[in-house]
Image (cartoon, grey):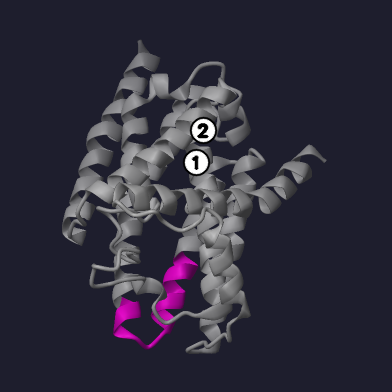
Amino acid sequence: MKTLVIVALYVVLAPILGGILAGIDRKISARMQGRFGPPIMQPFYDVFKLLEKESIAVNRFQNFYIFCFLIFAIVTGALFFAGFDILLVIFALTLAGTFFILAAYSANSPYSHLGADRELLQMMSYEPMVIITAIGMYMVTKSFNVADMAAYSQPLAYYIPGIFIGFLYILTIKFRKSPFDLSSSHHAHQELVRGISTELSGRELAMIEVAHWYENIFLLGFVYLFFAFNPILAVVLALATYFLEILIDNTCARLKWQQMLNYSWIVAVTLGMINLAVLYIMEIV
């Protein structure tokens, strides 16, 4: 019963909190760029406008893939906040990303295909660090269940600081912020604005936006897990992390995909694998 209540709360509250965060993001970004910026509720107005527009799909498969992307984005967060196996959570997250890429590939458009290629490269960049993070948390807590990790009496970041820094690094890719916003840039001066979703409109575009709100809340929940021993501190640090991502987004130029891939794997190998090796040696000693 408790699990059902948590899942229901996540399904209802996550898009509300995600939309408010998106509005705050726009407001802070505008102030950093010397503009007044839209109201905080603007993301909700945009989604409601999209829902009222006519839906024009390139083919019937595209709508199905977008629907699956939204469903698995919701399932990912629901499994995470309900305390299920973290490997199952990562599998659902990857499946959501795969459906998003398939939707772009199904459109016969060079812009959409280029965005899908870049989204695939982004997935290849962050996946190793996500797996290393799950393994590191398991080595500390001796459990793959998110509930056991959250109930651990010490801050996980204390035992896996290298993995935490590495996770923050790839978090910029997951949030689709500069310098890693290669697949769907939201900055108008770049050549591939909304690349992967170029051929989408109306209800499907609104579903993608809502799915990203669900994803963002799930990702902040992942940051929360590193400091879950103190819930108030964990919430503050998760919000501070989001502000850091906004700052990075507004102060960094976009990298090439080769740089993103190389740097991500170097960070994953250097920080993640060394941290795992240290944990293994500590267990032996």
The quarter of the picture where the N terminus appears is top right
- Dominant secondary structure (helix, strand or loop) of the stretch shown in magenta: helix
Residue 234: give x, y in percent of width and height: 52, 27
Residue 203: give x, y in percent of width and height: 58, 77
* Residue 86 to residue 11: above or below: above
What stretch of residues is rendered in magenta? 98-113
Q: Quadrant of residue 151?
A: top right
Residue 127 visible in the snapshot: no
Say if mark 2 contacts mark 1, CB within 8 Å: yes
Q: Residue at x 31, y 37 (%)?
A: 166
The residue beneath circle 2 is: 224
The residue beneath circle 1 is: 220
Residue 171: give x, y in percent of width and height: 37, 45
Q: Is residue 248 magenta?
A: no
* Residue 32 to residue 70: above or below: above
- Is 92 situated left or right of 237 in this image? right
- Is 130 situated left or right of 69 in this image? left
Number of residues whose C-alpha sits closer than 10 Å to that of mark 2, classed few (under 14), some (14–19) or many (20 or more) = many
